[in-house]
Image (cartoon, grey):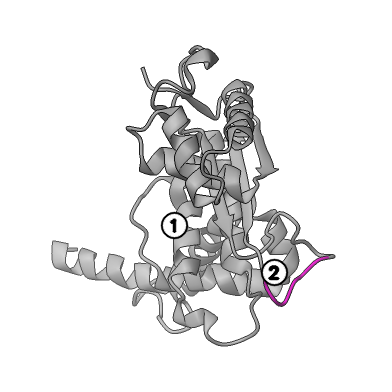
């Protein structure tokens, strides 16, 4: 078989594996054998994803889940060959509003729920290093940084509550603000954030040159508490708590 014929056969096989409903296997290939390869590819992909999205699968049911995986396999072109990153690609596929999701009844919170479930795996696999130990007494005087292993997240839907017994059909008025962090023992912790705590972490990322005191004073202005000593004291207590949890640290 010449290179052109081999390439053509491989292309035909790839199209068949992605979309067996509309693309035939290569000419001359045993149909039963082609079907085995088709099922292996689909089953492996479904199995690879299912460990990351258990709540989503329960909500969708087997038929809708298989349909979603089939659409992902057929329509999406991943940017990585790494198995450990396929779940992130799946979340990006859902967020891209694919044509396959324009029909049928899909949960309105599906994209955010998938992202929420993926975050746990992403932090467990992250190669980022925790912040080095430093003195909490310098929190007000030095610039601050947020640990790469602590992610402040904002969702429209209360994704941490969604499950078989709670399927909201309308988002609440207030967003859901969460902190997801990996601890020293590599476990992943989820906690809710107040709007001020979430904004403080956001500010640290936005204004990395500011000292802790300047961050709190800026936050006080945003909150309408300019010049409030009590506000600064409460903010410092929050910084100390997050410092103790490894969420924030002093820039060396």
| Quarter in which the C terminus is drawn | top left
How far apart marks 2 and 1 lie (CA) works out to 28 Å
- Residue 37 sits above or below residue 140 on the image: below
Question: Residue at left 46%, top 16%?
Answer: 132
**Residue 144 percent location from the top left of the image:** 43, 28
- Residue 196 sits above or below residue 247 on the image: below
Q: Alpha-carbon neighbours of circle 1 within 10 Å: few (<14), some, or many (≥20)?
A: some
Q: Alpha-carbon neighbours of circle 2 within 10 Å: few (<14), some, or many (≥20)?
A: few
Q: Nearer the viewer, mark 2 or mark 1?
A: 2
Question: Residue at left 75%, top 63%?
Answer: 58
Q: Quadrant of residue 29?
A: bottom left
Q: Which residue is mark 2?
A: 172
Q: Quadrant of residue 236?
A: top right
Q: Write the start and end of the magenta stretch as one range.
A: 166-172
**Residue 200 percent location from the top left of the image:** 51, 41
| Quarter in which the N terminus is drawn | bottom left
**Residue 30 percent location from the top left of the image:** 45, 71
SS class, disc 2: loop
Question: Residue at left 40%, top 40%?
Answer: 205
Q: Which residue is mark 1?
A: 89
**Residue 11 percent location from the top left of the image:** 29, 69
Q: Compare marks 2 and 1 and give the one earlier in the sequence.
A: 1
Asked if residue 127 can be seen in this view, the reply is no
């Amino acid at each position: 078989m010449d290179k052109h014929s081999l390439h053509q056969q491989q292309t035909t096989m790839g199209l068949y594996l992605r979309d067996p409903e509309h693309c035939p296997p290569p000419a001359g290939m045993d149909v039963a054998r082609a079907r085995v390869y088709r099922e292996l590819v689909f089953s492996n992909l479904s199995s690879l994803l299912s460990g990351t999205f258990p709540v989503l699968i329960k909500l969708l049911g087997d038929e809708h889940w298989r349909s979603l995986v089939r659409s992902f396999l057929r329509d999406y072109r991943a940017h990585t060959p790494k198995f450990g990153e396929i779940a992130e690609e799946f979340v990006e596929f859902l967020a891209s509003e694919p044509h396959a999701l324009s029909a049928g009844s899909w949960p309105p919170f599906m994209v955010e729920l998938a992202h929420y479930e993926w975050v746990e795996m992403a932090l467990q696999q992250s190669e980022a290093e925790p912040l080095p130990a430093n003195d909490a007494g310098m929190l007000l005087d030095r610039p601050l940084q947020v640990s790469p292993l602590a992610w402040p997240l904002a969702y429209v839907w209360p994704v941490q509550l969604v499950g078989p017994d709670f399927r909201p059909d309308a988002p609440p008025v207030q967003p859901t603000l969460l902190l997801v962090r990996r601890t020293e023992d590599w476990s992943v912790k989820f906690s809710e954030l107040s709007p001020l705590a979430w904004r403080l972490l956001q500010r640290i990322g936005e204004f990395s040159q500011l000292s802790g005191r300047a961050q709190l004073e800026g936050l006080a202005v945003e909150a309408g508490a300019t010049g409030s000593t009590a506000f600064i004291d409460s903010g410092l207590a929050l910084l100390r708590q997050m410092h103790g949890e490894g969420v924030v640290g002093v820039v060396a």
